[in-house]
Image (tube, grey):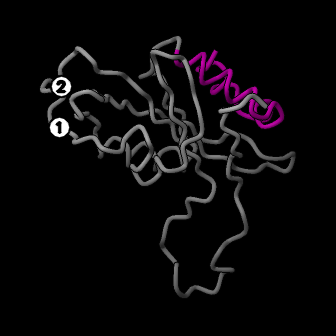
Amino acid sequence: MEPGKRKLEFNIIKNDPTDGHGGFGIGSLNLENVTPLMLDVEEGDVWIELQAMHARSKTERGVKYLKDRSELTEEGTKQYWVIWVAVDRKPEGPYYAGVTACELLINRPARRGFKSMPEHVNHLDKAMKGHIIVNNMDKDSRKVLGAFLKQHDEGIWERSSEHLKEELS
């Protein structure tokens, strides 16, 4: 592995944490099968960013988010995608069940950014429910994401839906 390269694994569903007892924890979301990715559009780079689950990734830290994207200046603003990947298991093995993408704009010099929190929360929920929502991404970013998911684990990619493969190719 090259120096400076990130190496993390996708989370794969574990057993029911409540073991069916019906007590504490019932009704809470199990995020063990969701992994957030970050994609830098300009660099064409994608990586697993676990801190994005709580909006505390290195990319997001130190930025004040504006309520209106038009307040963000074009100069110095970079576009990222926060991608929620839900992994589920079939009898044959794990597969990418849900993949959704949300836009994130960061102007590092101005320490300002824009993201729609409702969109991020809704897309996280939809990924957990097995939805594929990547048509909001530009074509090049979809290809980069598809290559990353395939390269990360070709077996998981092969077991994934044809719909996902079509959207990311």
**SS class of the residue under badge 1?**
loop
Magenta region, main secondary structure: helix
* Residue at image point 79% right, 48% down: 90
Mark 1 and mark 2 lie on one chain; the one further toward the N terminus is 1
Tell me what residue is drawn at x 21 percent, y 29 percent.
110
Secondary structure category for the residue under label 2: loop
Tell me the amino acid under the disc marked 1: Leu
Considering the image in quadrants, where does the N terminus appear? Answer: top right
Q: Quadrant of residue 97?
A: top right
State the residue position of label 1.
66
Residue at the right extreme?
Answer: 92
Give me the residue at 55% from left, 88% from top: 23
30 on left or right of 81: right
Q: Residue furthest front?
A: 3
Q: Mark 1 near mark 2, Cβ–Cβ under 8 Å?
A: yes
Q: Which mark is residue 122?
A: none
Q: Is residue 150 left or right of residue 74?
A: right
Horizontal side of residue 147 vs 116, given as left or right: right
Q: Magenta residues, as a range? A: 141-169
Q: Which quadrant would residue 74 be assigned to in this image? A: top left
Q: In the figure, 113 relative to 94: above or below?
A: above
Q: Name the residue carrying label 2.
A: 72
At x 23% / y 14%, what residue is drawn?
Answer: 75
Q: Considering depth in this image, is 104 or 73 the residue closer to the camera?
A: 73
Give the answer, above or below, for where 58 lies relative to 89: above
Tell me the crowding category of disc 1: few under 14, some 14 to 19, or many 20 or more residues within 10 angstroms, Cα based.
some
